[in-house]
Image: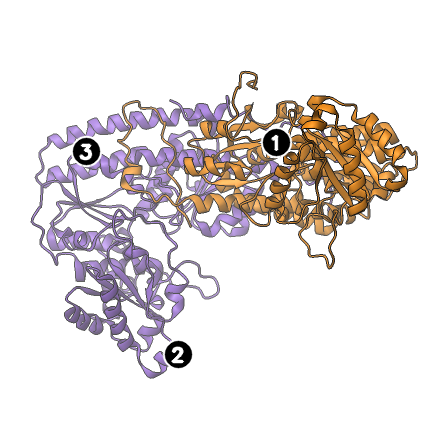
Chain colours: A orange, B purple
Amino acid sequence: MPASEARVLSTNPLKSSQPLGAAYAFLGIEGAMPLLHGSQGCTAFALVLFVRHFKETIPIQTTAMNEVSTVLGGADHLEEAIVNIRTRANPKLIGVCTTALVETRGEDFAADLAAIRSRRAEELGDCHVVLAGTPDFKGSIEEGWSAAVTATIETLTRPTTRRDPERLVILAPSHFTVGDIETLRQTVEAFGLTPVILPDISGSLDGTVPDRWIPSTYGGTPVADIESLGAACHCIAIGEHMRHPAEALRRKTGLAYTLLPTLTGLAATDRFISLLARLSGRPVPASIHRRRSQLQDAMLDGHFHFGGRKIAVAAEPDLLYQMASFFAEMGAEIPVAIASTPDNPILGAVPAEVMVGDLGDLEDRASGVDLLVSHAHGRQASERLGIPLFRVGFPIFDRLGAQHRRSALYEGTRDLIFEVANTLIAADHHHVTPESLNPLRNRETLHDSRPSPEPRRH
Amino acid sequence: MSLKARIATVFDEPACPTNREKSETVRKKGCSKPLTPGAAAGGCAFDGAKIVLQPVTDVAHLIHGPLACEGNSWDNRHAASSGSDLWRRSFTTDLSELDIVMGNGEKKLFKAIRTIVERHDPPAVFVYSTCVTALIGDDITAVCKRAGERFGRPVIPVEAPGFVGSKNLGNRLAGQTLLDHIIGTVEPDDVTPYDVNILGEYNLVGEFWFVKPLLEELGIRLRAVIPGDARYRDIATAHRAKANMMVCSSALINLARGMQERWGIPYFEGSFYGISDTSAAIRGICGLLVETGAPAELLDRAEALIAREEAIAWQRIAPLKPRLAGKRVLLNTGGVKSWSVVNALQEAGMEVIRTSIKKSTEEDKARALAALKDEKHLFDRLAPREIYRMLADGEADIMLSGGRTQFIALKAKTPWLDVNQERHHPYAGYEGIVELLKRIDLAVNSPVFPALRAPTPWDEEGRLLEGADRPAEVTPTFRKFANGVLEDADDC
């Protein structure tokens, strides 16, 4: 993996900041209010990006650090913000996400918070405050998401040795959409198990129209479920970045976990379904077997469009692994794989040469590929290179319905095959010409440098 | 001439070896095997006629009939045009119940021709009859004649209604139409000793453009390629070519023979599929040209070009060979491809375990037998269930066929590649065979098939099988492409 030390410039960043990822995770908890501990702008930019992606009101607040508090210390701002939020929005949980500003200044946030909790115990009442250390200068969405879930478990989950054989904890990765989580829940329920999914954005960011104004999140993982998280039969963590929270849960409650790096693809879903069958002691329902068969057919019908295609993927590490594995399993090549951050060990398993970089790197390396895969900011590279962009991850601000697109389990993989294939088919508008097929052009070298002729659209 | 008489003429094909062997009475019955109701497959005569004529690019193709004939079949083939795209537009009179009851068909047809002429101003209009308009007795020949005079351009009646027979008969009726109405109607002023026609070449996905520059390099002038990427005028002047090459087996044999009889143009049969077949085709064209008066040095130049192009092709095939060697192919196509593709696949080290000889002529069969050595490798018709069994049992690694049978292979979780008309990749000439082998490589080595053939982790009742639930943390089941074999395969 080429190191990025020598990099002095990021051109068209691939990353979003770590506190954004943490706030995103808190949005998947019921009655939560993410609070970015930093200057107003930190929150405003994240908020705007969330709103553009979800087309929803996003509850998120700021400690509004100013010049004076930056010099003298931010504890007062933190305290004031927490009390104000408690008074105005009455959330069940305030998720504090630190930012580069306050982390660079370097304060003992945990001690400050402990002091605030005891000093303001009466005002806070049953409102929980969780602290996630998420400086912008490290990590990206996945790291922030993981840190928020870890902090939530460490703060809220009660030690227990009780095991509820019907309950299954699922730690969901940051790239799971509302659609993925809904499918996941139905699948687990089909085995007679009750899933506790953390974070669960399917109830909070699924684009519904409530009949009253609610200032915090509505839906999401209930705080009570997080408190009793250990009382389950098992924990399944999805994506390498969910190992930290799974470890935290195991340390606190002794609950064993299985880490599945991806739920996309036939083999990966087979593993998950087999695990559910074992945990529940029940046979695989016929409806799930039918979904599996549908995926097999989608693979058969779809592989023509993937075979030999060159695909450039730029994404967060676990999403990069998910997408690259999917494409490789369908017979495509991944000549360009760009990760947003370097630390996730999953990068070693990505079926391609991975470099850590940005969308500028994508643009530099992707010419001649058939498809770009990245979030919506990849559109500039797409326009300049004349290569279609398949949007995945966050943010997707120039397409509707991002939250309901699926890529997990049998049905999600099936959807993904169709969506990608349709994107490729729609892009095959280059009609063949006598010149494009002339065998005598580019003959000087004798090298077969020419790409295969474009297939014609149906 | 009545339709019945014309069909009899088409069936009486002296150039056809099958036909020659028949007795007088049998010959009169025609070569079309009677279709079995309830067990017929394949297109009708209208389909066959349209397949042959529709790739003529600058002509408006007007189908006179109710909607289904055209509405259910248009824009389904991928012949390529270097000019007009008028041929891709679908024109039909879309006869209604009222039209049929009231006998408005002819009037409607005439108005339809006028509308096309006003809107698109094509050099010619082809009018196709269909079962219903033939049945109700619309006289399209008369309408076409009248419209032609009125609008000052050829309006050509194509009388091949579906019920007269099979697709192959339709092909021949189309050839007859070209002969009767079009070829020889325009005198060219630019004839050279190097003028040739290619008959039965459809330029699917532009594949003839893999071949054309090679012929042009030799100074050969393509008077008309019929029908691929043809213009009306090319065909109208085709009678001044010095030689004809007939490509798609015998579908247009009556056209080749007719042109020989009327204008003394010699023809030979060849194929552009496969390296040795492409070379043989180039030799055949040059040989006929030299016989008809072109300088003999053409043959030497042809040999030099063949040597050069074959070397390049082999060089490019070499890296694919290890990936294809020993792969067993079930070839289920028929016609000329029953042998021309066999040679190509064997050249790349693959083994053709069976080839279909349905729709193949005796000569095709003989050539297929020569390539495969043993009768048992040839089959006339395999039941879908039998094909499925062969593939599911792993008797072949890939099936090459047309779209109709693709799902037999896919449902048997076996690689499949389209080698028929609906395909999306060009396979003709030296370039084309490299492309075909690349496509076979992609299909036969696709990781999708091993994944699909892996056993389901549970039994029919959904009960988990032993050892199925062992979740691996990260299982790298992939090839590293960046330094891996696929990249190498593209380099020579």
According to the image, label 3 marks what residue? B217
Left or right: A110 as drawn, with respect to B15: right
* Separation (CA) of disc 2 from disc 3: 56 Å
Q: Position of residue B135 (x, y in %)?
A: 33, 75
Q: Which residue sits at x=37%, y=38%?
A: A453
Query: Looking at the image, is mark 2 or mark 3 earlier in the sequence?
Result: 2
Q: Amino acid at mark 2?
A: Glu
Q: Position of residue B319 (x, y in %)?
A: 42, 24
According to the image, label 2 marks what residue? B97
According to the image, label 1 marks what residue? A316
- Give the residue at the far front of this rendering: A68
Can the viewer see residue A122 in this picture? Answer: yes
Q: Which residue sits at x=51%, y=52%?
A: B383
Left or right: A81 as drawn, with respect to A451: right
Q: Which mark is residue A12?
A: none
Q: What crowding class fits label 2: few (fewer than 14 Cα within 10 Å), some (14-19), or many (20 or more)?
A: few
